């Protein structure tokens, strides 16, 4: 039974996607059937569920106010519920004749439980299902109040429309199940059971019809077998090449290439480019331990994108040495014969040595100390290159000789 309950709850979770005109048949079953049936009180149903391995809140049955007080004390909690044991639905919204006390009441102490039990026991409870005559309450169930995150309704009942038992479930809970059946039948699912076959394999089986898994690259060192399944043909070749040199590269849609150390500084650099009206062509973080060859490779990756019209290098040398960056920039500029302007902003460890290396290289590298100014210049230069290319013109950038 516990297994069946679990399956039904799983099915109920998908009810928003299910609908059928036949579901309306459930409406009659949920209200009343003309046949005589054995109905047992809620506390007996709880016991049957427990015997089948289905957990329920702690509970006990009281036939006197004093018994109710003792059961409430035994629960050792302030979250107590008294439920009138009357064979009718809608107890929580019903009332005892001549009073406003409903058939389901919350309390916090044994004394309150005793008082409430006194107002229930021996009285007539009137609900939508009892009619004005009501039904006598001879016992109350004292139980622990629960605070469910989600409530489901589940029933197995005989249904004339199918000539046999039907599992009925809803993700809307059971408090207003009759109203749900009448106003929102698509929120109730049904599964007729052939008594000769029982629940068939097709009814019980569940399949995952789609699956996508994504794994953090930082776990590769301990998940070698998993990462060997990688299909490199489905990934950006530039990102694949960058990974070989421990460079974090993500292609974007702009035309200003960015090479930065540190993810935070990279994000700030892209923001300031956009502030000046430009669009970054990529995110590239060289990290804190990049070598000259890695920096050179970063240049190759960025400039392999034909949309890049200018390149902005922004390095704050903490762990990363500025002179190493400068050596990589110079090597890449010489090897690649770059035809786009390169704006370099360096600060931090060995920055003076880096500036001297760039100044003596005699290459098309624009050194600027201020980040805001560097971004502004990079945006302007990219605009010049873009305009020239749109007119099929070539632009030759020359750095004035230092006198």
Image: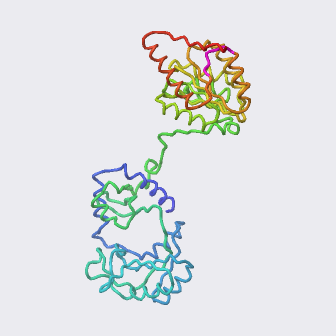
Q: Is residue 104 left or right of residue 241?
A: left
Residue at the far front: name it.
403
Kindly give the residue lying farthest to the left in the view shown.
Answer: 132
Q: Quadrant of residue 403?
A: top right
Q: How many labels does the image show?
A: 0
* 157 or 395, nearer to the observer: 395
For this rendering, which residue is in front, 341 or 208?
341
Question: Magenta part of the protein: which range?
Answer: 361-366
What x and y, as percent, mark residue 376? 52, 27
The colour scheme is rainbow
Front in this rendered view, residue 322 or 98: 322
For residue 162, which quarter of the picture?
Answer: bottom left
Q: On screen, 88 above or below 14?
A: below
Residue 189, x across and y down, in percent: 36, 55
**Residue 75, magenta (yes or no):** no
* Residue located at (52% from left, 66% from top): 54
Q: Residue 263: image x %, image y %? A: 61, 36
Q: In which quarter of the image is residue 329?
A: top right
Observer-nearest of 126 and 333:
333
Using the rendered image of the protein, determine whether residue 323 is visible from the camera's viewpoint: yes
Name the spot of residue 352 as percent of width and height, x first. 72, 27
Residue 169 visible (yes or no): no
């Amino acid at each position: 039974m516990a297994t069946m309950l679990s399956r039904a709850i799983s099915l109920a979770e998908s009810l928003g996607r299910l609908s059928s005109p036949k579901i309306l048949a459930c409406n009659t079953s949920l209200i009343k059937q003309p046949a005589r049936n054995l109905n047992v009180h809620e506390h007996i149903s709880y016991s049957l569920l427990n015997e089948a391995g289905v957990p329920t809140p702690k509970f006990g049955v009281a036939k006197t106010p004093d018994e109710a007080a003792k059961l409430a004390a035994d629960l050792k909690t302030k979250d107590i519920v008294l439920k009138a044991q009357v064979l009718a639905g809608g107890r929580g919204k019903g009332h005892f004749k001549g009073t406003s006390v409903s058939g389901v009441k919350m309390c916090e102490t044994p004394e309150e439980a005793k008082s409430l039990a006194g107002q229930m026991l021996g009285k007539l409870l009137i609900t939508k299902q009892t009619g004005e005559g009501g039904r006598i309450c001879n016992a109350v169930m004292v139980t622990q109040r629960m605070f469910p995150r989600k409530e489901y309704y589940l029933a197995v009942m005989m249904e004339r429309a199918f000539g046999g038992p039907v599992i009925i479930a809803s993700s809307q809970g059971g408090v207003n199940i009759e109203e749900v059946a009448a106003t929102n039948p698509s929120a109730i699912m049904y599964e007729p059971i052939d008594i000769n076959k029982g629940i068939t394999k097709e009814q019980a089986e569940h399949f995952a019809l789609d699956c996508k898994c994504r794994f953090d690259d930082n776990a590769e060192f301990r998940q070698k077998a998993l990462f060997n399944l990688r299909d490199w043909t489905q990934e950006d070749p530039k990102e694949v090449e960058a990974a070989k040199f421990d460079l974090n590269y993500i292609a974007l849609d702009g035309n200003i290439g960015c090479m930065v150390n540190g993810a935070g500084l990279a994000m700030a650099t892209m923001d300031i480019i956009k502030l000046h009206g430009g669009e970054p062509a990529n995110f590239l973080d060289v990290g804190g331990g990049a070598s000259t060859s890695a920096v050179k490779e970063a240049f190759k990756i960025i400039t392999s994108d034909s949309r890049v019209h200018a390149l902005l290098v922004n390095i704050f040398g903490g762990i990363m040495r500025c002179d190493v960056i400068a050596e990589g920039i110079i090597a890449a500029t010489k090897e690649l014969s770059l035809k786009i302007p390169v704006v370099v902003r360096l600060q931090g460890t060995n920055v003076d040595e880096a500036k001297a290396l760039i100044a003596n290289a005699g290459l098309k590298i624009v050194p600027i100390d201020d980040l805001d100014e560097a971004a502004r210049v990079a945006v302007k230069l990219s605009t010049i290159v873009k305009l020239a290319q749109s007119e099929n013109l070539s632009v030759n950038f020359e750095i004035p000789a230092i006198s």
